[in-house]
Each structure stands twice: as structure tokens, then as C-alpha cells.
Image: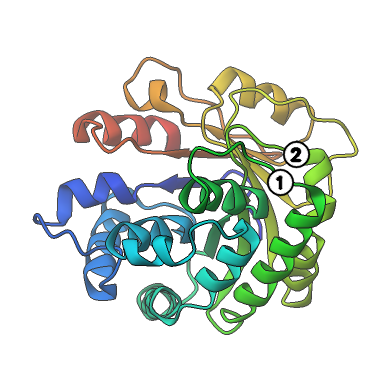
Amino acid sequence: MDLKRKVWLDFIPYAKRLFSGGRNDIWQNPDTFLSVYSQGQGLLRSDVLNIPVGEVYVRLLERESGLVEEWAGKRPTFSLKKLLALDEPREFLREVLAGLQNLYRGVQPIVLTLPSPQKWLQWLHTKVRPGQEISINSDDVEAAAMYLAEYVRAFSTSGLAAVVLEEPADPVIQHKEAIPLYQPIVNLANHYQWSVGISLSGATVEFSEGDNEVDFYLMSNADPAAISGYWEKGFNIGGGLNRDFWSGEQNVPPLSDSGFAYGEIPEEAEPEMVLSQLQKLRS
């Protein structure tokens, strides 16, 4: 997936505020989701269409608290396997992806962003073993990666260009050590010729020339100065569009052939400022 000089925007919470009309079923009704998403995309014109899988499951467990009660005390790996086997969220995602294919006809690449294996396990640990210290090891992460690889295979005909694994803010295993444990997902992506990205929450991260196990990195909290520094070193990293950028407090990062602009528009952002910043970015 070619990302050079692209502008990748995550905007669903912002678009929901502007276009949902008070409807609260965006994460369970494909028609509502596609209506909100297409209006947001029409306004903002992201070069990449990104669907966050984790949010679908967060909202599912909010609605279906009985699932958590059923899995109480179980290992997070067991809970993950059961969660990923549920039909409702998977069918929702299939319909959303089919809708995006019909709407955009491959003009913009479609990306599926999932919590990384260890992020899934950390999140589920808080649900099924609340109050207990998180205890996750490399074997757990490898098992979760195998479950996720099989899960993602279900979207092999959904027109994906890439999958992104979103790391937790406080990882048990740092990304450099975690990526080899994610190999089942990487292998599957390679089989289907999808690019693979890693999303990191830190504002700065140490990268070296050997950090090429994946195709790109996303850093939504990195400021333009930090991102420009990575670009100068030739790293394929997206970022620079952090909260300060959308409030007008940060300069617009000059786009580079070795990187791309990336960030999430805050839900509460001012529409006039958002459009003004995008105009500057693209000029």
C-alpha cells in the first residue's frame, strides 16, 4: 500500500457528532455506520479508509454484559477465542466493508485496524479478572495472534489493502519484542498481499534501521517536529496530526516522500478549524 505524501484521517467520533442525528447504533447497524462514515469522508477526504475493529467489540460488551459474566475468572486467551467466534460483530464488519467497497470502488485503500494480540488480552483481563494484576506472557500473546490470524482470514474477500495492529499505551511486551510474536497475522497478511502496520500511542519512539518487520508505523500523538525527524531518517511513519494540530496550536507538517500525515480528529474539534488545517496541509 503506497502511503507516500498521503493524508490518513481517523474521524469516526468526529463524524458521529456531526452526522449521526442522535442515533446511537453506529457500532451495530451497518446502515447507520455507512451513512455517518460516508458523510465524514465526503467532508474530510481521507486518503485511507480505516475501520477500527476494537471499538465494535468494546460497544458489544457494553450492550451484552452477560458475556463478561459468563467468562468471569477465565483466562483472557479463552475469552478472546470465544469473543472472536461471535457472529454478530463479524457480520457487522463484513457488511460495513462490503458497503465501503461499493461506495468507493477501490479509489481509497481500505484498512482494518485491530487491537494487537497483547492489547486484546490486557483489555479482556480487566473484564474477566477485574482487580487482579495483569499476567500475560509470550505464550499467551502467540496464542492470541493465532486466534486473530484465523479471525482476520474471514475478511479475505473484503477488499483490504492493509491490517494495522494497535499496541496498548502500557504494553507488557514492547513492540520490538512483540512483533515476532505476531507472526501468524503477518504471515496471513503476506499471503493475501496486505500491508501490515503497527500503531503506537507514544509521542516519541526510538526506531532503528532494523525496524522493518512491518510496512509502516502510525503515531497519532506525535507532533509535526517529531514526525519530520523520523521522515528525514527515511522511516515510513504516519503522524503529526495530534490534538494540538487540530486546535491550531501546532504547525502543519510538510509532507515527505518518506512518510505520510496521520492522526485522529478529536470528537469535539471545531469544524472551521479542522477544514482550515486540512487546507493548509494539502496546499
For residue 66, the mark is none
In this picture, residue 198 sits left or right of residue 82: right
Q: Secondary structure at mark 2?
A: loop
In this picture, residue 218 sits left or right of residue 102: right
Q: In terms of image quadrants, where is residue 219?
A: top right
Q: Name the spot of residue 74 as percent of width and height, x first.
A: 58, 60
Mark 2 and mark 1: span between their CA atoms?
9 Å
Where does label 1 land, which residue?
136
Identity of the amino acid at label 2?
Ile
| Residue placed most toward the observer, 79 or 145 | 79
For residue 173, the mark is 2
The earlier-in-sequence mark between 2 and 1 is: 1
Label 1 CA crowd tier, 10 Å (few <14, some 14–19, many 20+)? some
- Image quadrant in which the C terminus is located: top left
Q: Name the spot of residue 142 as percent of width and height, x first.
A: 78, 59
In the image, residue 113 sits, relative to residue 209, either above or below, namely: below
Q: How many marks?
A: 2
In this picture, residue 93 sits left or right of residue 184: left
Q: In terms of image quadrants, where is residue 160?
A: bottom right
- Image quadrant in which the N terminus is located: bottom right
Q: Name the spot of residue 48 as percent of width and height, x first.
A: 49, 56
Furthest-front residue in this view: 73
**Contact, mark 2 vs mark 1 (Cβ under 8 Å):** yes
Label 2 CA crowd tier, 10 Å (few <14, some 14–19, many 20+)? some
Identity of the amino acid at label 1?
Ile
